[in-house]
Each structure stands twice: as structure tokens, then as C-alpha cells.
Image (tube, rainbow, N blue to C red):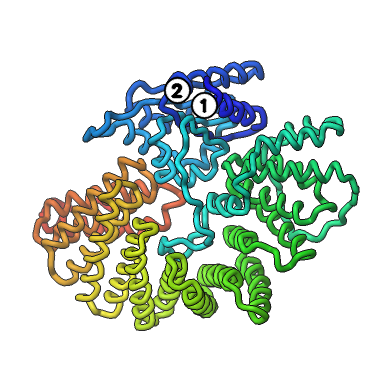
């Protein structure tokens, strides 16, 4: 291997040495021999430790598609030191069919659905070795799986990718979508100087700690994330002062190494170094100590250890406020509140935001700044999310009204920058949703219309065109739904038609499960509206198209509950439309399949209650069609 590959091998070797439980890695390369050399070294290293590397190298794309059931059930894999899935195969350039690309996509989509099961089941590493073109695919197809990786190796020069915007909200249009852990990794990276070299800092920490016997060995042992059985609200701790300048210098070097590893996405190494740095800096360097706590929280959140993450981020906030109350980053507060929200602790999440809001209001009264307004905007948006989730619609409306006001002020100060327009667009969307929830359809429509105008401006400015197109389509769907509620069916249909055109444009740029579902959902809405208007022929065509898209999603994702439910609903509606059009045999075929899927859903304990009404409706409608055809009594649901 060349020098660059040797450096990457060192990272893999360190990961294997430090890991004590499940970890996830990706290796991207167009050179099969280099990947094979790296794998063989890993295998030899594991053998010396009495462990086994289990290699899977499918010769055909179909081998990738069939891997997941084996990963989920084979008893031979549980104790493996590492499961290495390798297929350095690329499709022919310009080929109409891309079997390897589609096979990888299918594997990652389905693995993303079962990531928690795999993490709980496997006790060693799970490595995917693939060509470089697969990297953007896995990030898109399996964002939750990607967010928990411990190691990404590029045996090619990686492209420069801009960091994610520092916002806790997204343009998803969902009522509440807490940010995934990867966003907090991105946030943490923004505070790291590009000059930070993790490996150099690590060597410097070793040099500075060389006079302390056992220091390096202790660091090497701390390679896995801890797990707390319970969490209590942190309290200030008594800080023992050691006064050792050499130790503080060593701790600062370790913290720099942790920041470098975090910037590279090497979460296990970042956690281990931050833990060691925190132990040294506690009582000596509060800013460094709290920064180490934040890195611990980010790494723990990314690996699903939410209780540990909440404990560490709250300790970071508490200790930082004690010495520098104006220097508590908004990212820390937002993460603490959303972690509390994920636990269902609404009151604590509200209190975290309320404490921050009081502080920001005071600062803005003293002096208005862009940073102060931006931080308060994030707090108010988060407060709106928490209140809405808790059922406090009045509180949500008040908070989001405040967020919109701050977003308007930021837009004035930043002179219609894309970021300020996006912030205002998202705030207006959420405020409109709350107004809908409260039955204020007139106010909701006006709010959605203003947000839609901003989204159209954003599309003209560039930025993130796919997300902007999707946000426009979400707003149009909201406007269509309000039209349905108020009886303005012509306006509703026009809005749905425009949303469908936008979502088809997104799908045309690249097939994904989300894009398929987005198109199918609008087709369903249009079909329902046209059926209501007596336009049975066009309604039937809409539902049949939605069925086809749902079937394609099933091919990509497998039979997940969400996919089965969506397909069952589309088939039920297609059956309704076929019956209304007089095509009873086609209606019966659609309803028979909907019933089968409904029974499959009801057999799942976690889906039984929510899926029962759909199954009962399909059984009733099937019975009516059977009677009309004179084929006998319908079967009843079990």
C-alpha cells in the first residue's frame, strides 16, 4: 500500500484496538487490491486477539440484496470480531441499467430500517467496502445508519462538502423532526480550526504525558462509549485542583486531538480523547473541560446513548454558565432540550429553552446583534416544537410568532440572504401548521402563501435546489389541505397539481424512497379530491400510479410497516375508485390485496391497534363488491 493508504490503515487499526462493542465502518476505493491488503491486515490483527473476520464478497449484485436476513439471523456472526462486506464492483459507464448501484441502494435502505437490531445483535465491527460512487448513495439512502458510523476511509481524495447549516430545524415540513446526531457532529466541526491535525495533536499529547507512567495505556483502554444506567440532573461538582502545568498542557493537547477526530467524523477516537482530556482539565481549565463534555455528548448522541449525552451536555451548560454565562453555545442548549424531548420530558425541555430565552432577551435589550437574534430564533423555534408536541397549541403559536418576528428582523439585517429567507420560510411553515391545528384556516392560508413566496425566491437564488423544491411542494400540499377543509376544492386541486409537478421534478433527478413516497402521497390526495368531485377516471389513474410507486418502494426497502401501510391504503383507494367507475372485478382484486396487507400489519403487535381500522374498512368494502358481483359472502377479518 502507498503512504496515503498506510495512513488509512493506521486509522482502521486504531479502531479495531479501541473498539469493545459494535462499531460501523465504511471503506470507499476503486482499487480492489488495496482494499484486500487492508482487509488481510485486519484479519491477521483480529486473529492475534483470538477473534475472527467474516468476509462476504458477493460475485453478483443479487448477493448484496439478500444479505440483510443473514445478518439479522445467522448465529455465526454474533461473536465475530468483524463482518467485512466487500464488493469493489462498478457498473459500466453510461449503462442504462446499474445493477450494482441498485443492489447497494437496496441493501442500505433496508439496513437503515434495521440498524438498531443490528447494533444490539452484533458484538464486533460491521464494515462495508464499496466503490467511491457508493458514498453519496449511502448518505442519501441511509442517513440514520450513516450517522452512527465510527470510521469512514476514503482511499481516494474526498470531495469538499460544505458543512451543514447550524439550525435545529429542517425544511422537512414535519410537525416535529428532531435533528439527527450527524447535525450535531457538523455543528461541533464548525468550532474546530481547519488547521487541527488530530494525529499530530495525539502525538503531542503522548509526548507531554510521557512523564506520567501508565498515561498512554490508560488512554488506549478508553476506546468504547460508556453507558449510564440512570441519569439525574447534574449539579456543580467540587473541583480538585491539581495545579500541574504539564498535565494541563497534556489535557489541552488531548482536547485538540478530540476536536480533530470529531472534525474527521471519527467518533470513537474523539470520545476517548475527550474523556481523557476532561479528567485532566477538570478544575484547571473550565472552558476546555466543558468543551470536552460537549464532544462526549455529541459522540454519545451519534451512537444512540441519549441518557449519557444528556447528562454530559447539561453538565457542560451548567459549568460554562458558572464562569462565562454569555459563552454557552446555542447548539448545547438546543441539544439538551431536544434530548429531553426525545425522552418525553416536555417540562424539562421547555425549561431548558425558557432559561436560555430569558438570557437572550436580556442581552438583546442591552445590544441587538445578529448572533443574539439568531440564537433567540433557535430557542423560540425549539419552544414551538416542544409546545406543539405536548399539545399546548397556544404556547406553540406564541413561541412561533416570536420566531417569525426575529426571522423578519434577521432578514432585514442580513439583506435577504438565502439563510435568512430560509429561516423565515421554515418559521412561517411551522406557524401555519399550528394555526391549522387550532382551526384558524384563514390565518394558516395567509401564512403558507407568504412562506411559498419566499420558497420561490429561494429557488431563484440557488443554494439547495432539491430541498427548496421539496419545501415548495410541502407548502402547496398544506394550502391544498386547507382548501379541502374549507370547501375550496378548485384551489385545493390547483395546489396539489403544482405540488405533484415539483415532486416529479425531484424524483427525476434521482430515485430515492423519500422521493417516491412524496410523489405517491400527492397522487393519493389528488385521487381523493377527484373522487369527491366525481372524476372517477382520473382518480383511478392517480391511485394506480400511487400503487406502482409504493410497490417500487417495497422493492427498495423491503416489507417495512410503513411501506406495507402505504401500499395497503393506496390499494384500498384504488379499489374505491374502480368500484365507483363500475369496474368491480378490478376493484375486488385491489381490495383483496389490501386486506392481505392489512392482516399482515395487524399481526405485528406494535401495528395492530393503528392498522385495525384500515383492515376493517377494506374488509367491509370487499364484502360490498363481492355482493355486487354475486360471488358469495366476504370473509371476515380475524
What is the residue that sits farthest to the front in this orientation?
195
Element at badge 2? strand
Residue at image location 38% in from the left, 45% down from the top: 560
Residue 486 picture location, percent across and down: 29, 80
Nearest to N terminus: mark 1 or mark 2: 2
Structural crowding at the residue carrying mark 2, measured as other residues with C-alpha within 10 Å and reported as few (<14), some (14–19) or many (≥20): some
Residue 162 appears in view: yes
* Nearer to the camera, 320 or 583: 320
Residue 638 appears in view: no
> Horizontal placement of 468 versus 46: left or right?
left
Residue 635 picture location, percent across and down: 25, 51
Mark 1–mark 2 CB contact (< 8 Å): yes
Tell me the distance, in whole angstroms, between the alpha carbons under discs 1 and 2.
8 Å
Task: Answer above or below: position of 281 versus 202.
Answer: below
* Nearer to the camera, 245 or 276: 245
* Nearer to the camera, 519 or 417: 417
Residue at image location 24% in from the left, 54% down from the top: 546
* Nearer to the camera, 290 or 227: 290
How many callouts does the rendering have?
A: 2
Residue 540 picture location, percent across and down: 15, 59
Residue behind mark 1: 83
Residue 221 picture location, percent across and down: 74, 32
Residue at image location 86% in from the left, 32% down from the top: 211
> Horizontal placement of 567 versus 535: left or right?
right
Residue behind mark 2: 56
Residue 468: which numbered mark, if any? none
Amino acid at each position: 500500500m502507498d503512504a496515503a493508504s498506510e495512513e488509512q490503515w493506521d486509522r482502521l487499526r486504531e479502531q479495531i484496538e479501541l473498539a469493545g462493542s459494535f462499531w460501523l465502518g465504511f471503506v470507499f476505493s476503486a482499487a480492489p487490491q488495496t482494499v484486500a491488503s487492508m482487509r488481510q491486515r485486519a484479519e491477521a490483527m483480529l486473529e492475534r486477539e483470538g477473534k475472527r473476520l467474516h468476509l462476504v464478497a458477493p460475485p453478483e449484485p443479487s448477493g448484496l440484496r439478500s444479505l440483510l436476513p443473514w445478518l439479522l439471523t445467522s448465529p455465526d456472526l454474533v461473536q465475530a470480531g468483524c463482518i467485512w462486506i466487500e464488493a469493489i464492483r462498478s457498473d459500466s459507464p453510461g449503462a442504462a441499467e446499474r445493477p450494482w448501484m441498485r443492489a447497494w441502494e437496496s441493501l442500505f435502505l433496508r439496513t437503515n430500517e434495521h440498524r438498531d437490531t443490528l447494533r444490539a445483535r452484533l458484538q464486533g465491527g460491521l464494515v462495508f467496502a464499496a466503490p467511491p460512487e457508493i458514498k453519496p448513495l449511502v448518505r442519501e439512502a441511509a442517513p440514520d445508519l450513516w450517522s452512527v458510523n465510527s470510521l469512514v476511509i476514503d482511499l481516494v481524495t474526498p470531495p469538499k462538502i460544505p458543512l451543514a447549516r447550524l439550525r435545529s430545524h429542517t425544511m422537512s415540513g414535519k410537525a416535529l423532526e428532531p435533528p439527527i446526531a450527524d447535525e450535531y457532529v457538523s455543528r461541533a466541526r464548525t468550532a474546530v480550526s481547519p488547521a487541527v491535525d488530530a494525529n499530530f495533536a495525539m502525538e503531542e499529547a503522548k509526548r507531554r504525558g510521557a512523564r506520567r507512567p501508565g498515561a498512554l495505556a490508560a488512554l488506549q483502554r478508553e476506546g468504547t462509549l460508556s453507558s449510564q444506567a440512570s441519569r439525574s440532573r447534574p449539579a456543580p461538582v467540587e473541583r480538585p485542583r491539581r495545579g500541574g502545568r504539564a498535565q494541563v498542557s497534556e489535557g489541552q493537547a488531548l482536547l485538540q486531538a478530540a476536536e480533530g477526530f470529531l472534525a474527521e467524523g471519527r467518533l470513537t477516537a474523539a470520545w476517548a480523547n475527550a474523556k481523557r482530556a476532561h479528567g485532566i482539565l477538570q478544575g484547571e481549565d473550565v472552558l476546555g473541560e466543558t468543551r470536552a463534555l460537549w464532544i462526549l455528548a455529541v459522540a454519545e448522541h451519534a451512537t444512540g446513548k441519549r441518557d449519557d449525552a444528556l447528562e454530559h451536555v447539561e453538565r457542560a451548560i451548567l459549568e460554562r454558565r458558572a464562569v462565562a454565562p454569555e459563552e454557552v453555545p446555542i447548539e448545547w442548549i438546543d441539544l439538551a432540550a431536544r434530548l429531553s424531548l426525545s425522552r418525553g420530558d416536555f417540562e424539562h425541555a421547555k425549561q431548558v429553552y425558557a432559561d436560555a430565552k430569558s438570557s437572550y432577551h436580556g442581552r438583546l435589550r442591552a445590544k441587538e446583534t445578529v448572533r443574539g437574534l439568531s440564537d433567540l430564533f433557535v430557542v423560540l423555534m425549539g419552544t414551538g416544537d416542544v409546545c406543539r408536541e405536548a399539545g399546548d397549541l397556544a404556547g406553540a403559536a406564541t413561541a412561533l410568532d416570536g420566531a417569525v418576528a426575529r426571522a423578519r428582523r434577521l432578514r432585514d439585517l442580513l439583506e435577504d440572504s438565502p439563510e435568512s429567507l430560509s429561516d423565515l420560510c421554515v418559521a412561517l411553515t411551522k406557524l401555519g401548521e399550528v394555526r391549522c391545528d387550532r382551526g384558524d384556516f384563514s390565518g394558516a392560508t395567509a401564512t403558507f402563501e407568504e412562506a411559498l413566496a419566499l420558497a420561490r425566491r429561494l429557488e431563484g437564488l440557488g443554494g439547495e435546489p432539491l430541498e427548496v423544491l421539496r419545501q415548495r411542494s410541502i407548502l402547496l400540499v398544506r394550502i391544498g389541505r386547507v382548501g379541502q377543509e374549507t370547501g375550496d376544492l378548485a384551489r385545493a386541486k390547483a395546489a396539489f397539481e403544482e405540488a405533484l409537478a415539483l415532486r416529479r421534478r425531484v424524483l427525476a433527478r434521482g430515485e430515492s424512497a423519500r422521493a417516491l413516497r412524496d410523489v405517491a402521497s400527492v397522487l393519493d390526495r389528488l385521487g381523493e379530491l377527484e373522487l369527491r368531485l366525481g372524476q372517477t377516471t382520473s382518480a383511478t389513474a392517480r391511485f394506480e400510479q400511487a400503487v406502482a410507486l409504493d410497490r417500487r418502494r417495497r422493492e427498495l426497502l423491503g416489507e417495512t410497516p410503513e411501506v406495507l401501510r402505504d401500499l395497503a391504503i393506496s390499494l384500498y383507494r384504488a379499489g374505491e375508485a374502480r368500484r365507483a367507475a363500475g369496474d368491480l372485478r378490478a376493484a375486488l382484486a385491489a381490495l383483496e390485496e389490501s386486506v392481505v396487507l392489512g392482516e399482515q400489519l395487524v399481526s405485528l403487535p406494535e401495528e395492530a391497534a393503528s392498522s385495525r381500522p384500515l383492515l376493517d374498512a377494506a374488509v367491509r368494502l370487499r364484502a360490498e363488491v363481492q355482493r355486487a358481483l354475486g360471488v358469495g359472502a366476504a370473509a371476515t377479518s380475524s
